[in-house]
């Protein structure tokens, strides 16, 4: 076949879908849903399940996630300063990087009510305390203050897990 040969673009007869067929199909699906609905509702009422509206470690999950968010913004602030040649926050950036990793894992373990949570919490406290202490050295940076306070909140919630 010649590569430059034009393709035949004349319309060929295609089977058409009639409006009536579409409506019948949709109506049939809706009818099937109505028929199945009472059976599904009865099964749902009989099924034994628990609706846990308040997870056990909800606050810990939320403060850990908040710490990751503020930590990410603080780390970006550090990187912006590094770009200008200011490395005064290099220790802070290192602590934030550790804290973000630990906070992410903490949030996942707390949300899952992991059996390993209590074993992990002392590491979290140590990492968050170190990050908080480093951030408190830089009170002239608002993000450092916010990160320190976020770390303190995580530490407080972690201590509740150990209590």
Image (spheres, grey):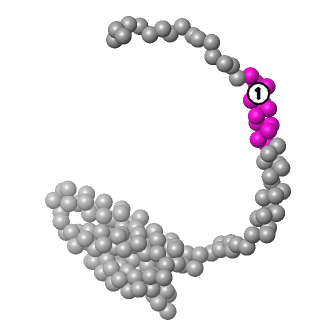
Is 114 positioned to the left or the right of 97 in the image? right
Is 31 positioned to the left or the right of 162 in the image? right
Magenta stretch in the rendered image: 18-30
Is 43 positioned to the left or the right of 12 in the image? right
Residue 76, position in %: x, y?
30, 60
* Residue 135 visible in image: no
Outermost residue to the bottom: 163
Residue 162, position in %: x, y?
47, 90
Q: Nearer the viewer, residue 83 or 24?
A: 24
Q: Nearer the viewer, residue 56 or 47?
A: 47
Please, what secondary structure does the residue beneath circle 1 have? helix
Residue 41, position in %: x, y?
80, 60
Q: Where is 155 relative to 111, above or below? A: below
Q: Where is 8 relative to 124, above or below? A: above
Outermost residue to the left: 85
Residue 144, position in %: x, y?
33, 70
Q: Where is 119 relative to 27, above or below? A: below
The quadrant of the picture occupied by the N terminus is: top left
**Occupied quadrant, residue 10:** top right
Residue displayed at 38% across by 80% down: 124
Q: Nearer the viewer, residue 35 or 108?
A: 35
Residue displayed at 49% across by 78% down: 114
Outermost residue to the front: 1
Magenta-span inclusion, residue 152: no
> Which residue bears the numbered disc 1?
21
* Residue 52 visible in image: yes
């Amino acid at each position: 076949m010649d590569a430059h040969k034009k393709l035949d673009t004349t319309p060929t007869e295609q089977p058409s879908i009639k409006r009536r067929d579409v409506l019948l199909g949709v109506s049939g699906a809706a009818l099937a849903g109505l028929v199945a609905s009472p059976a599904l509702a009865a099964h749902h009422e009989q099924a034994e399940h628990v609706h846990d509206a308040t997870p056990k470690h909800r606050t810990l999950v939320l403060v850990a996630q908040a710490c990751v968010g503020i930590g990410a913004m603080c780390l970006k602030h550090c990187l912006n300063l590094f770009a200008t040649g200011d490395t005064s926050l290099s220790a802070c950036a290192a602590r934030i990087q550790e804290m973000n990793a630990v906070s992410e894992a903490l949030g996942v373990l707390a949300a899952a009510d992991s059996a390993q949570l209590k074993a992990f919490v002392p590491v979290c406290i140590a990492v968050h305390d170190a990050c908080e202490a480093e951030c408190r050295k830089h009170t002239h940076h608002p993000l450092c203050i916010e990160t320190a306070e976020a770390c303190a909140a995580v530490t407080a919630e972690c201590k509740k897990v150990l209590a």
